[in-house]
Image (cartoon, rainbow, N blue to C red):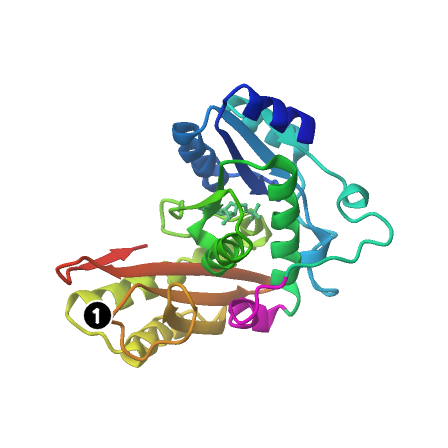
Amino acid sequence: MKEFARKQRDENRIVGLVPTMGALHPGHLSLIKQARQQCSSLVASIFVNPTQFGPSEDFAKYPRALPADSEKLENAGVQCLFLPEAKDIYPPKYSTYVDVEGLSERLEGRSRPGHFRGVSTVVMKLLQIVQPQFAYFGRKDAQQAAIISRMATDLNLDTEIEICPIEREADGLAMSSRNVYLQTGDRQSATVLHRSFQAAQTLLQNGSRDALSLQSAMHRVLKQESRAKVDYVEIVDAETFEPLTHINRKAYVLLAVKFGETRLLDNMLVDFSDTGELNVEL
Ligand code: AMP
């Protein structure tokens, strides 16, 4: 992989990396599409990274679909599929980890201890191996994207981290490899997530900037679905992920909700133009 990437750079190609865990869907392909606009050599990686799964999480049953994934990547114009094995990424005596303090401890970090340490370590390794000019991540996993951006800045990496919009199903559900776990009833119920964001969006558009009012409105919508078990609904500063009480700067409205055994994440980006005009991205 290092040799291939070095050759691409020597031949003055702009190398872009799209790291994934496979079971590819249009969300992943949207990252590749954006990468294609900026880069002349695309590398996608598929690696179900054991260190980011907790002991009782779904590592063993995480969906794997290699032949179909490989075809999708080729059709999308990816030149190189990097498929490392766990024994190569974490050989015996492996002992170096990257910890992005603070940011990694909140929200997802609290619900999944050690998760982000695994994520930042594997992404750091992928970036070291490929040394791309650009690497692409989805806003779907907003906290992960913020942590990786922080890591790239803090560790003086030469890679620019690009954060891409959320790709959704027609009914608003954010695409995710884990959506295949949803039972039929739960899949239908999961549309409540999008409705809860729409309720918050309406309040924002009507001038409310009070985080608690938005959170309460979202909880009220989510309560309408008895199958939805809310883990958190939070409003945070988009860079530090510190909770906000008053929404007066770039912020994320984030939630994690369980349907049966399946935990879904989604978020909405709130931003303001220089003239103070509100901009909401679902
Ligand atoms: P994963 O394979 O789930 O680790 O995801 C690989 C990359 O795709 C991550 O940067 C995700 O944030 C991104 N991604 C996953 N789902 C979506 C989506 N619905 N829209 C945009 N990006 C996504």
Q: Where residue 83 sits: x, y (%)?
A: 69, 35
In the figure, 198 relative to 23: above or below?
A: below
Seen from this angle, which residue lies furthest left? 275
Secondary structure under tag 1 reads helix
Number of disc labels: 1
Q: Residue at x 52, y 28 (%)?
A: 42
**On the picture, is 207 further left or further right than 168?**
left
Q: Is residue 1 visible?
A: no
Query: What is the quadrant of the C terminus in the image?
Result: bottom left
- Residue 101 sits inside the magenta stretch: yes
Q: Position of residue 207 (x, y in %)?
A: 15, 71
Q: Is residue 32 magenta?
A: no
Residue, x 50% and y 23% (percent of image)? 13
Image quadrant where residue 80 sits: top right
Q: Between residues 68 and 242, which one lies in front from this camera angle?
A: 242
Q: Is residue 42 visible?
A: yes
Q: Is residue 110 above or below residue 122?
A: below
| Amino acid identity at mark 1 | Leu
Tag 1 residue: 203
Which residue appears at 42% of the width and 74% of the height? 242
Residue 27, percent across and down?
A: 46, 42
Q: Nearer the viewer, residue 36 or 169?
A: 36
Q: Which residues are magenta?
A: 99-112
Q: Residue at x 33, y 59 (%)?
A: 269
Please say if 159 is above or below 78: below
Q: Does the closest atom of ligand 1 sit within 8 Å of the Cβ of label 1? A: no
Where does the image place residue 1, in percent across and percent down from the top left?
Answer: 68, 30
In the image, is residue 162 above or below residue 243? above
Q: Residue furthest right?
A: 92
User: Mark 1, residues whose alpha carbon is within 10 Å: few (<14), some, or many (≥20)?
Assistant: some
